[in-house]
Image (tube, grey):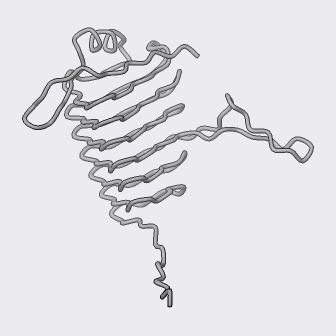
Amino acid sequence: MNLNVFLLKSGRKIGSVFSSFLSRKEWQILNSYPNVKVPKTLVYNKSFRFSHGKLESVKIDIADNVTCRNNCFFHIANHAELIIENNVFFNNNCSVNCLDKVFIGENTMFGEGVRIYDHNHSYADENGELKIELNKFSKDPVIIGKNSWIGSNTIILKGVTVGNNVIIGANVVVHKSVPDNTILVNKQNLETINRS
């Protein structure tokens, strides 16, 4: 797999926030392909990593006012699509791992540590032994609607559609689709035990 990685570290201070924009050269390279649209206004903080397959084989469409805080990572493999609409905010340590298709609707916010995967490793049972395939995957798109808030450390798995106007609480593993206008939480019963 031919991957290119931009480790974007340059930046400038805006008020009390250290922010960066794509350099002219980075922007020109990314946007020199008709299937790639990355705005000059993409805002990112320290160590934003952006890896992709051959630019002629991917579709990347990132709209205006997308912000990525510290240590975010986007991976788009060959023949995959990443579409991010306007006004999307990624907090620290988020990752989008795209081997098929990931779509994120406008005005959506991601808490710290959110992970999005549109794929799983393939595996087989060979004579009673589990064999996990390092480079074989099952894939299914992830669609996240507009005006949604995804809580910290949430994991969104392949084949999931998150509707519009959805709130997902912290630490939820989302493995089924979530309808519009709902709140999804990981309900755990906490028990206090007296030590005496």
Left or right, residue 12 beside residue 85: left
Q: Position of residue 2 (x, y in %)?
A: 54, 13
Residue 104, above or below 58: below
Residue lying furthest left: 15
Among the 4 quarters of the image, the one containing residue 17: top left
Q: How many marks?
A: 0
Depth check: 123 or 71 in front? Answer: 71
Q: Quadrant of residue 70?
A: top left
**Residue shown at 46% from the left, 21% from the top:** 52
Considering every residue shown, the one lying at the far bottom of the view is: 196
Residue placed at 37% from the left, 33% from the top? 83
Tell whether 176 sits left or right of 121. Answer: left
Which residue is situated farthest in the right direction here?
127
Residue 118 locus on image (x, y percent): 53, 40
- For the residue pair 66 and 142, the one nearer the viewer reads as 66
Image coordinates of residue 162 in percent, x first then y, are: 41, 53
Residue 84 falls left or right of residue 17: right
* Relative vertical location of residue 28 with respect to residue 169 in this rendering, above or below: above
* Above-or-below relation of 55 to 165: above
Q: Residue at x 46, y 59 (%)?
A: 172
Residue 117 lies left or right of residue 126; in this view the side is left
| Between 125 and 152, the one nearer to me in the picture | 152
* Residue beneath the point at 48% across and 74% down: 188
Q: Residue 25 location in percent, x, y?
A: 26, 8
Quadrant containing the N terminus in the rendered view: top right
